[in-house]
Every structure is written in structure tokens, then in C-alpha cells.
Image: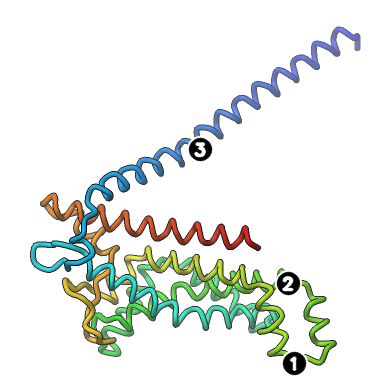
Amino acid sequence: MSASAINHTGGALALRRKITSIIGWVGCGLGLALVILPLLDIVGVVTVNGIAAINWDLFTKNTGGAALGMKNAIEGTFIITIFAMAIAVPIGVGAGIYLSEYGKNKLGSTIRFLSDVLTGTPSVVLGYFSYIVFIISFGWGFSLAAAAITIAILIVPYLARITELALTQVPNTMREAAFALGSNDATVVFKVVLPAAASGVITGALLALAISVGETAPLIYTAGWSDYAWSGKFTHSPVAYLTYVIWTFIDQPDAHSHSLAYAAAFLVMMVVLAINIGVRLTVRRK
């Protein structure tokens, strides 16, 4: 083959690669735009309407009657989240410790498989299950206990898997050094391995917190709804929460209910944003 033919072939290949590269970059740009633009639109609409709806009454009055505020919903979201995390964190972190340190067996494989299945289960299915078990079978009625346990069940698999991954990143030499100094299993786990993986465990807890704040479907079946503040009872007492305000009030015919829905969406978005910033700061600190 002559030199001119080789140059012509090389030029054709280079042109083809350039065209393919341009097409690829244009496709990636369009895909990015399809993801970013709707997200920016949602965030912008919620932010503009949410900030416009923020006032002191939102934090001092309940939604009862003429829907004046969201004090009961803010309080209910906080209480449900706190109790759910109180149940889920010890169980999830404990499961993660077992999977990391002692779960190299069939039981550990089974727990991992079930965790993955539960993670992929739609939350509405879990809510319906809890409705049948807690609300009907146990006779608790719409209540804080049913809601908190349901959210805890939802986030335990995330905590367990993230904790396991964090603990597996700890070098085995640290464990071996602790055992060589005469430490027992509990000392190695709780005073050596767990502190070394603390940032990863905290990250998992924060992500679980974000999930619990933004859930709606399980709470519809378990917490119900109340126009008033939590009565202090764990059963037979419905609880208000912010995501219900978003889901329900936006369908109401009056503008004031719409403003409450936007305000609730803005508050939830800000809480989730703050949690995600906390996650990034924790990871960066690590």
C-alpha cells in the first residue's frame, strides 16, 4: 500500500473517530440536561413558592380548622424520626458489625440477601404490611409506635450494609494488633474497629435519617394524620407529618393550602440538603 493510500485511510479513521466523539459528547450533554433541567425546575419552583409561604404562623399554629400552620406536622416528623432512629441505629449497626466481623458464613449470606431484598422493596408495600400487622392485628390504630417501627424496618438494611462496608475498610492489622495485646472480641470491635470506622457509620446513619424524613407511603398506612399535636400516646393516637401536607394539601382548591404544601416541601428539602451536606463533611473529614 502506498504512502498516500495509508495517509488517506488514517485521515478517514481520524475523521470517523472525531465524528463519533462529537456524537458521544452531544448524547452525554443531552442526557445530563434531561437529568439536571427537571431537577433545577423542581428545586426552583419549590424554593420560590416555599420561601414565599414561610411565616411565623407555620411554626406556632397547627393545621386544624382553617389550616393556619404546620407546627403539628413539624413536631410529628421530628418525633417519628427520632424514635425510628432510636430503634434502627442499634439494630442496623449491630447487624453491620456481625456481618463484617463474624458473617463469613451461610447465616451472614442469608442476612445480606434479605437486606438487599428489603432494600429493593417499595416502601408502600412495607407500609401495607405494617398496616395489617400493627394497625389491624395488634389493634394499635394509627399511632407513633406503628410509624416509628415501620420506618425503622425500612432503614435498618441501609444501616447494616453501610456499616458492614465501613468496617471492612478497617485494616486487619489493627485487629491483629489488638488481639496480640490480649484484647477480647468486644474490646477489639467497640474500642478499635468501630472507632476507626466511625465516619462511615455516621454517614450511614445520616443517609438513613434522610430517608426517614422523606418517606410518605409507609406513614399513610401507619401514622394516619392528625390536625393537632402529638398526644403523648404511642398507640391509638394518629400523628401529623410534613410529607402528608405535601401529598394532600397540594390537591386542595384554596391557595392557602397550596402555600402550606410548598412550605412543607421546602422544609423537607432543606432538611435533606442539610443531612447530605453533613454526609459530605463527614466523608471529607475521614
Q: Amino acid at mark 2?
A: Val
Residue 32's disc is 3
Q: Nearer the viewer, residue 111 or 183?
A: 183
Provide the secondary structure element on which disc 2 rests.
loop
Task: For the C terminus, give its image quadrant.
Answer: bottom right
Asked whether the beta carbons under mark 3 and mark 1 sit within 8 Å of each other, the answer is no
Question: Compared to 56, does 116 lie above or below?
Answer: below
The answer to whether marks 2 and 3 mark residues whose Cβ atoms lie closer than 8 Å is no
- Across and down, in percent, residue 146 comes to 32, 81
**The image quarter in which residue 233 lies:** bottom left
- Mark 1, residue position: 184
Mark sitting on residue 9: none
- The span from disc 2 to disc 3 (Cα, nearest Å) is 36 Å
Q: Is 217 placed left or right of 200 in the picture?
A: left
Q: Earlier in the sequence, mark 3 or mark 1?
A: 3
Query: Which residue occupies the extreme front position in the image?
Result: 56
Q: Circle 1 sits in a helix, a strand or a loop, which is it? A: loop
The image shows residue 94 at horizontal and vertical percentages of 58, 83
Provide residue 57's location: percent of width, then percent of height: 18, 61
Q: In the image, which disc is placed on residue 170? A: 2
| Residue at point 27%, 70% (across, down) | 220
